[in-house]
Image (cartoon, rainbow, N blue to C red):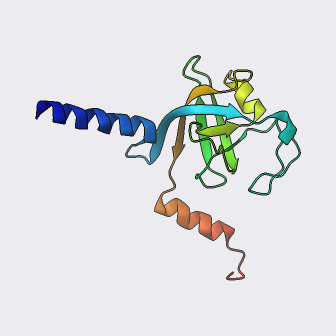
């Protein structure tokens, strides 16, 4: 019975560290691996319709809404950068986020290819979603 409880506790903690944690302030913390865009993508359109520029602090994530601000930290040196999600990817299940080259350089992972990172972002609350909807309303009702 004790072994079963230990296994359940281990898997619960492991699940939280892999899938992220949420605190009272809607802040989500995740650990995973990051990579960055190859220079061949400069000038191409992202999924959001914006053109990729390697000097901008942007990133790709599979599910976060476009416009979400994400802070990415390199745990090896403690350097952080805040990026804006404007594309979809990475599509390798072992990777959590694709950074622009400038973002990768700011946290010291440029040249590494793939690096462990910590990612944090705030989930939009009901009030934020309502305000965002009002801001985007152009009065046409569409």
User: Which residue is pictured at 38% across the width and 39% down the height?
Assistant: 16
Q: Quadrant of residue 107?
A: top right
- The residue positioned farthest toward the left in the image shown: 1
Q: Is residue 106 left or right of residue 117?
A: right
User: Which residue is nearer to you in this view: 129 or 120?
Assistant: 120
| x then y, percent, for residue 81 | 65, 31
Q: Quadrant of residue 23?
A: top left
Relative vertical location of residue 31 with respect to residue 79 in this rendering, above or below = below
Relative vertical location of residue 121 with respect to residue 131 in this rendering, above or below = above
Q: Is residue 137 left or right of residue 5?
A: right
| x then y, percent, for residue 31 | 50, 33
Give the quadrant of the N terminus: top left
User: Which residue is pictured at 74% across the width and 55% down the height?
Assistant: 47
User: Which residue is nearer to you in this view: 18 or 49?
Assistant: 18
User: Which residue is pictured at 66% across the width and 66% down the height?
Assistant: 135
- The residue positioned farthest toward the right in the image shown: 43
Relative vertical location of residue 24 with respect to residue 5 in this rendering, above or below = below
| x then y, percent, for residue 96 | 58, 39
User: Which residue is nearer to you in this view: 54 or 81?
Assistant: 54
- The residue positioned farthest toward the bottom in the image shown: 141
Total labels: the figure holds: 0
Give the quadrant of the C terminus: bottom right
- The residue positioned farthest toward the top in the image shown: 77
User: Which residue is pictured at 64% across the width and 45% down the height?
Assistant: 91
| x then y, percent, for residue 128 | 53, 60
């Amino acid at each position: 019975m004790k072994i079963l409880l230990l296994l359940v506790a281990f898997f619960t903690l492991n699940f939280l560290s892999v899938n992220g944690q949420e605190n009272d302030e809607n802040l989500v913390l995740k650990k995973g691996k990051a990579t960055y865009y190859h220079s061949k993508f400069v000038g191409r359109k992202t999924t959001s319709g914006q053109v990729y520029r390697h000097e901008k602090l942007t990133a790709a994530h599979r599910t976060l809404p476009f416009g979400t601000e994400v802070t990415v930290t390199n745990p090896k040196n403690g350097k952080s950068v805040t990026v804006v999600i404007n594309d979809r990817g990475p599509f390798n299940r072992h990777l959590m986020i694709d950074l622009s080259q400038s973002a990768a350089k700011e946290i010291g992972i440029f040249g590494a290819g793939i690096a462990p990172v910590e990612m944090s972002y705030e989930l939009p609350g009901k009030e934020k979603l309502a305000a965002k909807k009002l801001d985007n309303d152009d009065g046409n009702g569409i």
